Image (spheres, grey):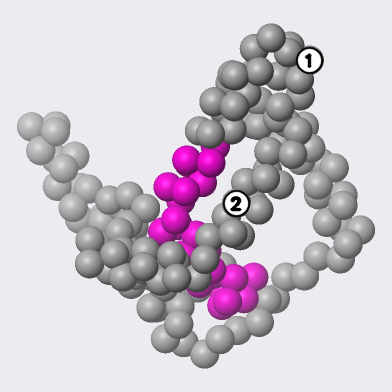
């Protein structure tokens, strides 16, 4: 009985949850620009490539077993290497993943609308510029504040 009620509640709230995702996408576009929000949906379609890159990094870190000091420092530059990897994905692959995503109904999870529909919704409206801008000094302060968390997360991802 409880499971049935939970499932019914999930079904009733699913549409509201998906609508909230479209609204969140719209807010993201207003904060960071339509172009950036559309770029994020494209990144979602190639997230498997980021997972593969992180797995390669973790495996490479395990291979340096004899070199304890080198292994302990393997986390340095992880996020920059991952960003470079993601930036190296050619536009043709993004386009291929967009077509596949539309055919297969790619979605982040069951509560999110299909990614291709989220992207189409963003592109349907007039493009908006970013409302939030961070100067170099502010970006440096944010990076310094997040440095410890970046290190902990990199070490965790590489299982160090």
- Relative to 157, residue 67 above or below: above
Q: Could you tell me which residue is drawn at 75 percent across and 33 percent down?
A: 76
Please, what is the dominant secondary structure of the magenta stretch?
A: helix
**Marks 2,1: beta carbons within 8 A:** no
Measured as percent of width and height from the top left, residue 35 is found at 58, 76
**Residue, far right:** 137
Please state, as top left, top right, bottom left or bottom right, where the C terminus lies in the image: top right
In depth, the one of 54 and 64 nearer the eye is 64
Q: Could you tell me which residue is drawn at 41 percent across and 71 percent down?
A: 95
Q: Is residue 152 visible?
A: no
The mark found on residue 69 in the picture is 1
The mark found on residue 135 in the picture is none
The verdict on residue 42 being magenta is yes
Q: Could you tell me which residue is drawn at 26 percent across and 55 percent down?
A: 13
Q: Earlier in the sequence, mark 2 or mark 1?
A: 1
Separation (CA) of disc 2 from disc 1: 25 Å
Over which residues does the magenta segment extend?
29-54
- Element assignment for label 2: helix
- Element assignment for label 1: helix
User: In the image, 100: left or right of 138?
Assistant: left
Measured as percent of width and height from the top left, residue 7 is found at 16, 43
In depth, the one of 89 and 129 nearer the eye is 89
Label 2 crowd (10 A; few <14 / some 14-19 / many >=20): few
């Amino acid at each position: 009985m409880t499971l049935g009620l939970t499932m019914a509640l999930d079904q009733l709230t699913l549409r509201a949850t998906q609508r909230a995702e479209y609204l969140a996408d719209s807010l993201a576009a207003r904060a960071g620009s339509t172009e950036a929000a559309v770029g994020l949906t494209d990144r979602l379609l190639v997230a498997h490539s980021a997972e593969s890159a992180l797995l390669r990094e973790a495996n490479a870190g395990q291979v340096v077993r004899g070199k304890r000091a080198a292994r302990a420092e393997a986390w340095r530059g992880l996020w920059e290497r991952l960003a470079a990897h993601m930036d190296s994905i050619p536009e043709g692959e993004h386009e291929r993943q967009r077509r596949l995503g539309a055919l297969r109904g790619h979605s982040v999870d069951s509560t999110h609308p299909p990614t291709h529909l989220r992207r189409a919704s963003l592109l349907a409206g007039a493009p908006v510029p970013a409302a939030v801008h961070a100067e170099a000094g502010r970006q440096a302060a944010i990076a310094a504040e997040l440095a410890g968390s970046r290190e902990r997360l990199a070490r965790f991802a590489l299982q160090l």
